[in-house]
Amino acid sequence: MATYATPDDTRDARDRIEPGGVPQRHYEEAEPARLLRRLLQLDAAFVTISGSLTAIFSVPLASFLGLSSPVALIVLGIALLPYAAQLFFNAKRKPLDPRTGFVAGSLNIAWAVVSLLIVLAGWPALTDQGKWAVLGMAAVVDLLGCAQLYAARKLRRELAAQPH
């Protein structure tokens, strides 16, 4: 368990003493960084859950969507899991790089656009319920992507305004 240095210590009060006596710098995280970190964590959780459920329930989901085979859903669900792990890893980095938010947000918006194009193109042919489900998921993913871009932009501006 970490103990914090006392003000009368020779160390800065923001230094944390880890087991073994090694000081680790503790810093206050700016609001945009906290917001982006939470959005990345939310994204990672959402991708983990949706990817897992897509793979596990691929047969009934394929039927619901109007797909002839569940194979694409299994592959998609499994392929999303490493991306979710990367999102979790990136969200834990300190300091948080705004580029992480720009990449995640852009990928989410791209996912939403591709989903919309799939529905509009009619390939693969989806049931009416399947179209609405794809569009609903696309809307959620797009909203998350826009929020990530907003937080990344705020963080980049805040970092640029700090004295070097």
Image: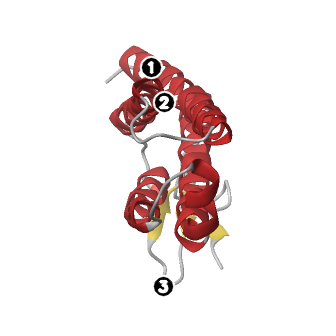
Q: Please name the amino acid that badge 2 sits on.
A: Val
> How far from the left and from the top, in percent, is residue 139?
61, 28
Which residue occupies 54% across, 82% down? 19
Q: Please name the amino acid that badge 1 sits on.
A: Arg
Q: Is residue 69 above or below residue 13?
A: below
Q: Is residue 132 left or right of residue 23?
A: right
Residue 126, can we see it?
yes
> How far from the left and from the top, in percent, is residue 72?
39, 60
Which residue occupies 67% across, 54% down? 7
Mark 3, Cα crowd under 10 Å, few <14 / some 14-19 / many 20+, is: few
Q: Which residue is mark 1?
A: 153
Circle 2 sits in a helix, a strand or a loop, which is it?
helix
Q: Which residue is mark 2?
A: 119
Quick one: 120 or 112, which is closer to the camera?
A: 120
Q: Which comes sooner in the sequence, label 3 or label 1?
A: 3
Q: Is residue 142 above or below residue 50?
A: above
Q: Which residue is mark 3?
A: 20
Q: Which comes sooner in the sequence, label 1 or label 2?
A: 2
